[in-house]
Image (cartoon, grey):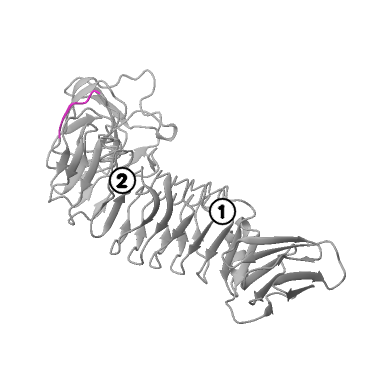
């Protein structure tokens, strides 16, 4: 058996994970429909795959003939005088094979991977045997299959020609990723409470929706046309992947503490979003969660958060403060804060700035300040060569050694910068509250301004 490597789907999120031979396939054979198909070996069975390079998204290399017409996938295949049972259809196996009109799948197959028949635009008929129990995401997206496809408790595919209101059959417990992709004429989808799993992007580009899609535990999709503030209904435990993606008019998102998990990219591309209230029961900010939320200037991460996923805040270009409540620095994924401005201030619990500085947070944020609560007037967080006073509601700064070459930035407790003082000077009158003064050498002072 050739060495296998894990291959990620070209879409942001994947459903059924598949493996592929490092040399693209192990062997080829002519099926009973006369088409040359490609296989890799997996624990003594054969998996139908594409002949191209997944890493380069080149699934059917130029010069290789794609299947045409009525495709038959055989239940067994011979190679080097050995007969192998065909048990799966790999992710992207027939991606873009627009000449296929029908597919016959043998009763030996139990798995159809992500995007296996996506963009087979001529496909109008497929038989799926009872043996298939695992379906990936976007399996039949971009085909011409005329009817909904669901097997037992799994909903797989809805034709893009669907219109009006559609009610998910009562026996369905799982909706595959991309199942309703680009069903732009649907106005609403009714979920029974029996549905407990919804795959990534299930309702992406359903731009005609007029009502949010959710049941008693899952929030699946807010109409892309929605504008203003939205509060996720109490009792919802899961905010599904892509459920708010590209809702460009959404300005505020509030979730109750019943929410315990978010899916990848849940709030990505919400370009008008300025305020987010997260659930105190969340433990993870998933990958791509707030990617390209270009108006979001601040966010508070509850103490329950222990990890930040890959590219979670990628291209949040207006971010000027992030407040983290956890005393233990959460783990940070790849490019989680890429293109967040260098001036963004990280506000952490009192006494934890050193711990944050020693992790990847410290390499990402140059300004880390501590929230040490209220009730004191002035407190040294570090030994200070500077003098900080409050006078008439203004914060004034001076150098003890007479130096006139320093910068002091003043932040409120949300992390917003309210003043920048070059050398000695004082702010304008400030509202009562607690402020953090950060000097260029990372000396930090906490100041309380009282009513004036």
Bin the neighbour count of mark 1 within 10 Å (Cα to Cα): few under 14, some 14-19, many 20 and up: many
Does residue 286 appear in this view? no
Q: Which residue is mark 2?
A: 15
Residue 222's spot in the image, x, y percent? 33, 48
Q: Secondary structure at mark 2?
A: loop
Q: Is residue 118 magenta?
A: no
What span is in magenta?
122-127
Circle 1/circle 2 CB separation < 8 Å: no
Quarter of the image where the C terminus is located: bottom right
Residue 435's spot in the image, x, y percent? 64, 70
Q: Is residue 316 above or below residue 450?
A: above
Residue 406's spot in the image, x, y percent? 80, 62
Q: CA distance from mark 1 to mark 2?
A: 31 Å
Q: Is residue 128 above or below residue 34?
A: below
Using residue 96 as the reference point, say whether residue 286 is left or right of it: right
Q: Quadrant of residue 165?
A: top left
Q: Is residue 125 magenta?
A: yes
Residue at the farthest right position: 402
Q: Of marks 1 and 2, which one's residue comes earlier in the chain?
A: 2
Which residue shows up at 23% across the image and 19% down it?
A: 68
Q: Which residue is mark 1?
A: 319
Q: Secondary structure at mark 1?
A: loop
* Residue 157 disc label: none
Nearest the viewer among 99 and 373 is 373
């Amino acid at each position: 058996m050739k060495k296998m490597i894990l291959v990620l789907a070209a879409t942001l999120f994947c459903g059924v994970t598949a493996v592929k031979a490092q040399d693209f396939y192990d062997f080829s054979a002519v099926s009973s429909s006369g088409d040359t198909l490609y296989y890799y070996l997996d624990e003594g069975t054969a998996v139908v795959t594409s002949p191209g390079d997944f890493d380069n998204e080149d699934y059917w290399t130029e010069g290789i003939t794609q299947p045409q017409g009525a495709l038959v996938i055989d239940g067994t295949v011979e190679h080097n005088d050995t007969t192998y049972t065909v048990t799966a259809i790999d992710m992207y196996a027939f991606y873009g094979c627009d000449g296929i009109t029908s597919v016959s799948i043998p009763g030996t197959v139990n798995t159809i991977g992500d995007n296996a028949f996506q963009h087979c635009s001529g496909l109008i008929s497929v038989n799926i045997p009872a043996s298939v129990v695992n379906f990936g995401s976007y399996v039949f997206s971009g085909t011409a299959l005329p009817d909904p496809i669901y097997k037992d408790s799994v909903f797989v595919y809805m034709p893009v020609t669907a219109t009006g209101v559609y009610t998910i059959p009562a026996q369905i417990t799982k909706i595959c990723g991309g199942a309703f992709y680009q069903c732009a004429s649907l106005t609403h989808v009714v979920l029974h409470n029996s549905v407990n799993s919804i795959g990534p992007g299930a309702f992406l580009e359903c731009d005609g929706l007029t009502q949010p899609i959710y049941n008693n535990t899952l929030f699946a999709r807010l109409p892309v046309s929605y504008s203003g503030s939205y509060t996720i209904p109490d009792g919802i435990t899961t905010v599904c992947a892509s459920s708010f993606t590209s809702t460009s008019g959404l300005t505020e998102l509030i979730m109750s503490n019943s929410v315990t998990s978010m899916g990848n990219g849940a709030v990505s591309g919400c370009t008008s979003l300025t305020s987010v209230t997260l659930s105190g029961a969340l433990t993870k900010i998933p990958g791509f969660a707030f990617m390209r939320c270009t108006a979001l200037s601040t966010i508070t991460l509850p103490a329950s958060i222990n990890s930040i996923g890959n590219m979670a805040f990628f291209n949040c270009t207006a971010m000027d403060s992030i407040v983290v409540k956890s005393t233990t620095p959460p783990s940070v994924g790849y490019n989680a804060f890429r293109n967040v401005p260098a001036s963004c201030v990280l506000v952490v619990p009192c006494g934890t700035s050193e711990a944050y500085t020693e992790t990847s947070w410290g390499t990402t944020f140059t300004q880390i300040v501590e929230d040490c609560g209220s009730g004191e007037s002035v407190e040294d967080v570090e030994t200070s060569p500077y003098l900080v006073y409050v006078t008439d509601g203004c914060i004034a700064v001076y150098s003890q050694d007479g130096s006139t070459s320093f910068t002091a930035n003043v932040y409120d407790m949300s992390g917003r910068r309210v003043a920048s003082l070059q050398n000695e000077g004082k702010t304008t009158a400030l509202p009562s509250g607690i402020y953090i003064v950060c000097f260029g050498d990372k000396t930090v002072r906490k100041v309380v301004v009282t009513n004036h």
